[in-house]
Image (spheres, grey):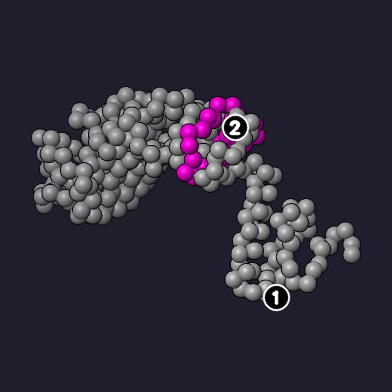
Amino acid sequence: MGDNQPPRSSGVPPSPSEWRSSSSRWDLVEITRRMDTLDVQTGEIQLHDMILDLIISKSTDENLFTIVNDSKFMRRLCDFRSLQVLILENSDQQDLTGICTLTKLSLNGLFKSAHHLQRLFLSDWQFSRVPSWIGELNVLHSLELSLGKLLKDDILILAEMPSLAHLYLHVRSAAKERIVISGTTFIVLKHFKLICKRIPLTFEAGAMSKLQILELEFNARGMERQKELPFGIGHLSSLKQIHASISGFRATLSDRTAVEFVFNNVMCIHPNHPCVDIKYEPYKFIDWDDEDEYM
């Protein structure tokens, strides 16, 4: 048998160790052919094991590391000097200090910063405020974050991030005073999504000058008084799309009319005539109700 041919046997797939030693000479077509001669249930189990073994083997080659549950068995993360993608499921707190080349982080746990992160998705964890170290991630371009409260200081941290192009914030409670987005901040942001019961934002002239997509999810209650509506959307000079998901929980018809007027007015007077998509979800935020926020 030539060196370029995988070892043949009577319908028995290679063991994980054989797979590792000859992975460059095997492909999924060969594995599928061999599975035809096996009992279906047994074959599925063995195929799953072999594919998992291949993934683990290739993960080492591609600087990809995946840990499920048993994080205590892996080496210290700071030992992975070339790590670029890290996915942790159900893991304990990990120290990310020293991972100099990390460019994507997705984990369910607490961590320290890694200055080469480009994408950070933490929407499943709720922070009380925007962690100050996030503002130090100078090459971060995508951020998903869940917050207990959104205040002016939080916006200031995010607004100065030099590479942030995609921002998704899920906020439990907004500040009662209006939050002003100035014209010298969020200089590269292209896509902004904000989920919050109230959105008292004001966009100044020149704000978010490269923003193309704005997504807002909020409750229409109290909008008739014009105190909770986002002001200055017309100042978003590059805006192309507006997506608004609006809860009608305890909102009046006048509240809904006020919301529609604001967004339709933007569509008409904005130079780009952005596409406006409005949908209503009657019971969204029903478990977030707080009478004090509407006083």
Mark number for residue 37? 1
**Residue 18 lies within the magenta run:** no
The N terminus lies in which quarter of the figure? bottom right
Label 1, label 2: how far apart the Cα atoms are: 43 Å
Identify the residue at image location x=15%, y=45%: 221
Residue that mark 2 sits on: 76
**In the foreground, 229 or 65:** 65
Identify the residue at image location x=64%, y=52%: 55
Percent x, y of residue 241 = 35, 48
Percent x, y of residue 18 = 76, 56
Percent x, y of residue 226 = 15, 38
Identify the residue at image location x=61%, y=61%: 48
Q: Residues within 10 Å of mark 1 (few under 14, many from 20)?
A: few
Asked if 212 appears above or below 95 in the picture, the reply is: below
Residue range in magenta is: 81-103
Q: Residues within 10 Å of mark 2 (few under 14, many from 20)?
A: some
Q: Is residue 226 left or right of residue 157?
A: left
**In the foreground, 242 or 175:** 175
Choose top left, top right, bottom left or bottom right for residue 236: top left
The C terminus lies in which quarter of the figure? top left
Q: Amino acid at mark 2?
A: Arg
Q: Is residue 50 left or right of residue 209?
A: right
Identify the residue at image location x=62%, y=35%: 75
Q: Is residue 23 visible?
A: no
